[in-house]
Amino acid sequence: MSKTIKIKNFSISKSTAFQVFKYTIYLLIAYDIYHFFIEDYAASNQTYAGGVSPIQIIEAFTATIDTIAWLILLLLFELETYILEDEQIKGKVKLGINTLRALCYTFIVYSLYGFIAKFNLLHTTAPFLIQDTCSLIGSNFTYIKEIDKYWPITKEICQGFANIPLLQIVGTQIITDHPQLIEAQRLSTVEVTNSITWLLVVFILEVEVFLQLRGKLTERKIKLSKWIKSVLYAVLFLVAGYWGVKGGLLDFRDAFLWLVAFWFIEMNIFKWSEETTQAKASSKVTPVKEANK
């Protein structure tokens, strides 16, 4: 019998409480999509001053599209590793999951391209030749306050830029000083690192699910995958920590939520593998018992 948590006249099993907690995390990730859209929309008005063409949508709304694709992929892992039984992942169900998965990976890889494009953009600068930055007040010129956050030139800002060499991001009306540019470039590097590392994590998870469905996920393979993933998760923890110190609250919170979410998937796979191993052990024992009767 599962243990229960009692609050006055209300009781809930620990298993149910855990599931509520898990799906609350998933919902919080879904809510982050809205915040990323607001940020991407504001940033695209500066980096794509001439308007965003259809071919540039993924580059302009990289964080939004990336988060949507990752959330769908997370839910697919949840379906395969927890909700559906092994015998249900066949035929049309399997085809539907694989089709959605392929679509998600297409957008995720394209989003990685978007992060790399932003990285290249922030590393393509030229000296800003206008000496009087106060003449830019009221114009379309902005300056980088944080990565993906661009602020209009005000009197206070232009006075702070007096006698400071400025740089302009080529092809845009964005200016910055060298220290702030370095910070933005570092955060862009962290974004690319984060995206690549997560792709490596899910690649290993995909291999685990593939082997598990075929009954070939041995203890040795589990230990090897755990060792590799421990290194990758360590990188992701460092990324989350860097965002917590240097980045925005949204990026830090989102990074933390994703780590918790995939911890749930890891637990699902572990329990799934454990149940399969126990089922195999039981099937081997049964014939022996019958033979001894």
Image (tube, rainbow, N blue to C red):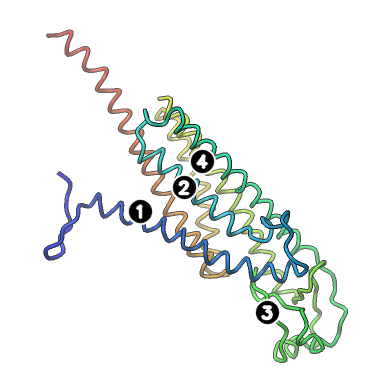
At a point 75% along the width and 76% down the height, the residue shown is 176
Quick one: SS at disc 1? helix
Residue 193, image x and y in percent?
A: 62, 53
- The tag earlier along the polypeptide, 4 or 1, is 1
Residue 11, image x and y in percent?
A: 16, 58
Up-down relation of residue 267 to residue 115 (above or below) = above
Q: Which residue is mark 3?
A: 151
Q: Nearer the viewer, residue 224 or 124?
A: 124
Q: Which residue is mark 4?
A: 228
State which mark lies toward you, 4 or 1.
Answer: 1
Real-space Cα separation, disc 1 to disc 2, in angstroms: 12 Å
- The tag earlier along the polypeptide, 4 or 2, is 2
Q: Is residue 223 left or right of residue 283?
A: right
Write down the quadrant of residue 182 in the picture: bottom right
Write down the quadrant of residue 28 in the picture: bottom left
Real-space Cα separation, disc 3 to disc 1, in angstroms: 37 Å
Q: Which residue is mark 1?
A: 22
- The tag earlier along the polypeptide, 3 or 2, is 2
Residue 8, image x and y in percent?
A: 12, 65
Q: Amino acid at mark 4?
A: Ile
Q: Answer yes or no: do the residues labelled 4 and 1 have beta carbons within 8 Å?
A: no
Real-space Cα separation, disc 4 to disc 1, in angstroms: 25 Å
Quick one: SS at disc 2? helix
Quadrant position of the C terminus in the picture? top left
Mark 1 Cα shell of 10 Å, populated few (<14), some (14-19), many (≥20)? some
Q: Answer yes or no: do the residues labelled 1 and 2 have beta carbons within 8 Å?
A: no
Q: Which residue is mark 2?
A: 74
